[in-house]
Image (cartoon, coloured by chain):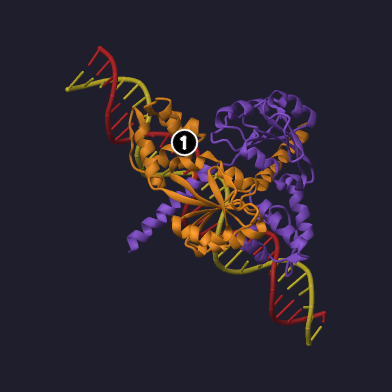
Chain colours: A purple, B orange, C red, D yellow
Amino acid sequence: MARLPVYLRVLTGFADGGIATVSSEQLAQAAGVGPAKLRKDLSHLGSYGTRGVGYDVDYLVYQISRVLGLTQHYSVVIVGVGNLGHALAGYAGFGTRGFRVAALVDADPARVGETIAGLEVRHSDELETIIKDHEVSIGVIATPASAAQDVCDRLVSCGVTSVLNFAPLVLNVPDQVDVRKVDLSIELQILAFHEQRKALVAQGAS
Amino acid sequence: MARLPVYLRVLTGFADGGIATVSSEQLAQAAGVGPAKLRKDLSHLGSYGTRGVGYDVDYLVYQISRVLGLTQHYSVVIVGVGNLGHALAGYAGFGTRGFRVAALVDADPARVGETIAGLEVRHSDELETIIKDHEVSIGVIATPASAAQDVCDRLVSCGVTSVLNFAPLVLNVPDQVDVRKVDLSIELQILAFHEQRKALVAQGAS
DNA sequence: ACCGCTTTGTGCACGAGTTCACAAAGGGTC
DNA sequence: GACCCTTTGTGAACTCGTGCACAAAGCGGT
């Protein structure tokens, strides 16, 4: 389920605030979902709540972390050190929760050797070596669209089975490889669509 | 539909390549969906295809642009000029297709006055003035989580009804406001989940 | 030990989105 | 002009996720 990470974040926030137990209603409100949906989601993991009381925050954090596979550690390689790659390298979310950036890689020799967020940028020719040495399981593609499919093929051929793609194109991968896509311009266009819809409704009502 | 922007991008790619007509099968493959789904999506916009031939690329580009509201122009304000805000300001996708970055805003006085991608960073106290002067309709939140809800409230109170949120928290907004969320760590955790699932299957099979 | 209050876990119905399969409709060819 | 081949548009069955409503279950006070 794609909502578990949200629950996990909210729960860790509660844990930091010293809250020991939460009801499904509190948790649902904080996570922006309905209470019934939340209970059904959690029930799929097992019965970890106490009727009449709620859920134990720490225990639930542990269980969700376990289900998500966050008890293990994953090495990540970021390919493409443009504006976006830069931002990703400095992103604090990688360090926490078991993700480690193994290396930054770029095709531009002028960028190789540069140090970003404590990591040296290496040339993309070394991609295969890096992946094998660090047992990288997740690849992040932050290259221009023209290079993305090629980079993706190389990642996959080295055994990477999870890809996070920021390039604006649909990647072609074998079935066993998971790709998640983050696309700015698509998000903007969806917002534009809703803006227009709202404008039309307002116009029609006036 | 959230897939229209993908179709649009693929179609503009075809148009640039000088292709005049496409079949649903070609387009579906390039967009990573099934042919039936694509035809049903397009049929919701009207009957713009020719049986036995396919779809006229240019005409379809125009129709999808129109439905998405991209024939109008939208002003965007980016709040928070950290690593991510920096990357967003330099993102080429804003300029194309009717989106204009009206201003960059940050709460840190040390950053105010800095010029990024041809735009001067202004202090967040001016947020209300900027929104009214430029008729901003879309707000992008690239601040730390602690400031995000406050920024969002200010955007909404100025009449912004579309928000793109990069901060790792669930924003609380009135019903008529659309929020889209982009969250790195959630994407990573989902990939981790699938990684673990694949690892367990492989282990179980061996 | 019992009773009532709170909260979980879940059976059921409903609706949205997806897939299949085929009829309708063009274009090309003879 | 008639026939055949290709491709669209869509009706119908199906799946999946969602929300409601309620029974089961624990806790605390008396």
For label 1, the crowd category at 10 Å Cα-Cα, with few meaning under 14, some 14 to 19 and many 20 or more, is some
Residue positioned 79% across, 28% down in the render? A133
- Percent position of residue C26, x then y: 27, 29
Of B145 and A140, the residue lying toward us: B145
Task: Write down the quadrant of residue A124 in the picture.
Answer: top right
Image quadrant occupied by the C terminus of chain B: top right
Of B13 and D23, the residue lying toward us: B13
Residue position marked by numbered label 1 in the rendering:
B9
Q: Residue furthest front?
A: B113
**Secondary structure under the numbered disc 1 in the rendered image:** helix
Task: Write down the quadrant of residue B47 in the picture.
Answer: top left
Residue positioned 73% across, 70% down in the render? A52
- Percent position of residue A86, x then y: 66, 39
Task: Write down the quadrant of residue B171 in the picture.
Answer: bottom right
Residue B1 in view: no
Residue A15 in view: yes
**Residue type at mark 1?**
Arg
Of B8 and B35, the residue lying toward us: B8
